[in-house]
Amino acid sequence: MKLESKFTIPAAMLALSLAGSPVFAGQSQPASPQPAQPPTASQAPAAQSQTVLGELVKVDVDKKVLKIKAAGDKEMEFRFTAATEVTGESRNVEGLATKTGTKVSVDYQGEGKNMVATKIAIQDADSNAAAPAPAPAPQPAPQQ
């Protein structure tokens, strides 16, 4: 019996110490820390969208390009894609081609020759006109 207790206590201690280890707990050892790597193109933050207001100068449906005249008579050229959203009275880019001279708002990403329109909104003619003056308040009838 003495021989059993000599082996039982160390065996129990070994079993308890191994039971707490990650190998027996079904967990893998943590990998050694890896140096931080720069984000890949798919992880890069999305480009910030910008908006510009102007007058529609030209739409080339075949080349998928539109030009507007922004503040200070600055001409800006944008590419558009099938994903470009068109709002207002024209619901598609082809309809824009007939709207030369119309006020538009262009949401875009990129800069220089790489500006891509994400949304083109035709400004309503009503929003460009001055609001009519409010009617005068009615006067109370004179008392007799």
Image (cartoon, rainbow, N blue to C red):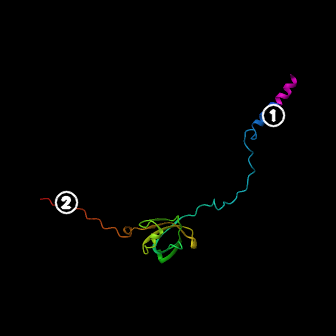
Q: Are marks 1 and 2 in contact (CB under 8 Å)?
A: no
Picture quadrant where residue 131 is located? bottom left
Relative image position of residue 71 (x, y in whole percent): 47, 74
Picture quarter with the C terminus: bottom left
Against 72, residue 4 (above or below) is: above
Amino acid at circle 2: Pro
Q: Residue at x 42, y 72 (%)?
A: 102
- Using the image as rendered, state which of residue 130 and residue 75 is in the foreground: 75
Label 1 vs label 2: CA separation?
102 Å
- Which residue is label 1 attached to? 14
- The boundaries of the magenta stretch are 1-10
- Our reading of the magenta stretch's main secondary structure is helix
* Residue placed under numbered mark 2 in the picture: 140
Answer whether residue 79 is magenta in the image: no
49 to the left or right of 5:
left
State left or right for residue 114 relative to residue 121.
right
Q: Secondary structure at mark 1?
A: helix
Secondary structure under tag 2 reads loop
Residue 98: name its quadrant. bottom left
